[in-house]
């Protein structure tokens, strides 16, 4: 039973489409800029293999690239240490639950979106316990960063070992007001990622790799084209058969589950 007042429903609405489009445009702008300003000594770009110059010049850095893999020399402590960045591995699917589950959810979220934080802090734990952990729901995390802190946050999370991804983004959502609102967010991301097992060299190499940013921008554009995303968080259920917008209560998810499963999945509201 949904007891949200009109004011609560209004507050649960997420970031408007205009801001979302601006975010995509900004990331795509980075891609255009670095492509247009690449050093003339780099090999030509093609659709299969790309080498993109970083936005800022990094001292003592040399890069070579193969498809979806970059080896960058970065400063690590007192000596330059080669750090291999496997872009394909970094951008691989991050998910929870069985891929054979009858209900599949794709979540489009931004790490700096307050409504996304509300969902992950207050709603997601019950959804996970009742439906993901029991094999009824497959949940896939999809990136939709709406500003630079969110972009840097998701790059950091993806560069961690895969089993650290969900705990790390959970931490970022829980501490969102401590790191996302200020200008000095990179040291906080770096320190927290170090505690999760990411070395300084790996952190710097990930954030210097523009192929990662390009792929995130491409994913955002594809999401808007395919699913007409208008807010964060947005939950695409069973490849678009149903869409849930905003940090709605668990009961709304259960209503959708019942609809898609012919009442086989999803607890019905109590009869008063």
Image (cartoon, helix red, strand yellow):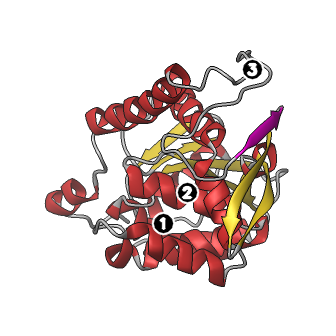
Residue 254 is situated, as x and y percent measured from the top left of the image, at 54, 59
Q: Is residue 88 magenta?
A: no
What residue would you read off at disc 1?
250
Distance from label 1 to label 3 (Cα)?
51 Å
Crowd rating for badge 2 (residues with CA inside 10 Å; few <14, some 14–19, many 20+): many
Instruction: Name the residue nearer the viewer: 60 or 165.
Output: 60
Q: List x then y, in percent, for residue 267.
A: 58, 67
Answer whether labels 2 and 3 touch (C-beta < 8 Å).
no
* Magenta segment: 62-66
Q: Which residue is mark 3?
A: 43
Residue nearest the observer in this picture, 94 or 231: 94
- Name the secondary structure under disc 1: helix
Which residue, as the protein is rendered here, is positioned at the far bottom?
Answer: 195
**Quarter holding the N terminus?**
bottom left
Mark found first going from the N terminus, 1 or 2: 2
Q: Quadrant of residue 27?
A: top left
Q: Nearer the viewer, mark 1 or mark 2?
A: 2
Instruction: Judge by depth and name the residue closer to the eye, 78 or 272.
Output: 78
Q: Can residue 36 be seen?
A: yes
Q: Are marks 1 and 2 in contact (CB under 8 Å)?
A: no
């Amino acid at each position: 039973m949904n007891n949200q007042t009109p004011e609560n429903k209004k507050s649960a609405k997420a970031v408007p489409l205009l801001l979302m489009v601006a975010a995509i445009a900004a990331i795509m702008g980075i891609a255009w800029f670095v492509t247009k300003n690449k050093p003339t000594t780099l090999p030509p770009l093609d659709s299969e293999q790309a080498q993109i110059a970083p936005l800022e010049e990094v001292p003592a850095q040399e890069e070579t690239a193969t498809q979806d893999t970059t080896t960058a020399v970065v400063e690590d402590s007192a000596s330059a240490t080669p750090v291999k960045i496997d872009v394909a591995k970094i951008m691989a699917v991050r998910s929870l639950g069985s891929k054979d589950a009858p209900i599949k959810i794709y979540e489009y979220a931004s790490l700096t979106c307050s409504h996304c934080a509300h969902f992950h802090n207050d709603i997601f734990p019950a959804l996970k316990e009742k439906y993901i952990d029991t094999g009824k729901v497959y949940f896939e995390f999809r990136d939709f960063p709406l500003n630079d802190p969110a972009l840097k946050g998701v790059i950091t999370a993806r560069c961690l070992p895969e089993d650290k991804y969900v705990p790390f983004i959970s931490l970022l959502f829980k501490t969102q007001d401590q790191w996302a609102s200020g200008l000095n967010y990179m040291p906080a991301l770096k320190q927290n990622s170090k505690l999760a097992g990411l070395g300084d060299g790996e952190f710097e190499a990930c954030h210097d790799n523009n192929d990662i940013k390009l792929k995130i921008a491409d994913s955002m554009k594809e999401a808007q084209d395919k699913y007409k995303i208008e807010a964060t968080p947005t939950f695409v259920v069973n490849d678009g058969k149903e869409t849930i917008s905003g940090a709605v209560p668990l009961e709304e998810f259960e209503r959708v589950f019942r609809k898609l499963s012919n009442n086989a999945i999803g607890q019905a509201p109590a009869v008063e």
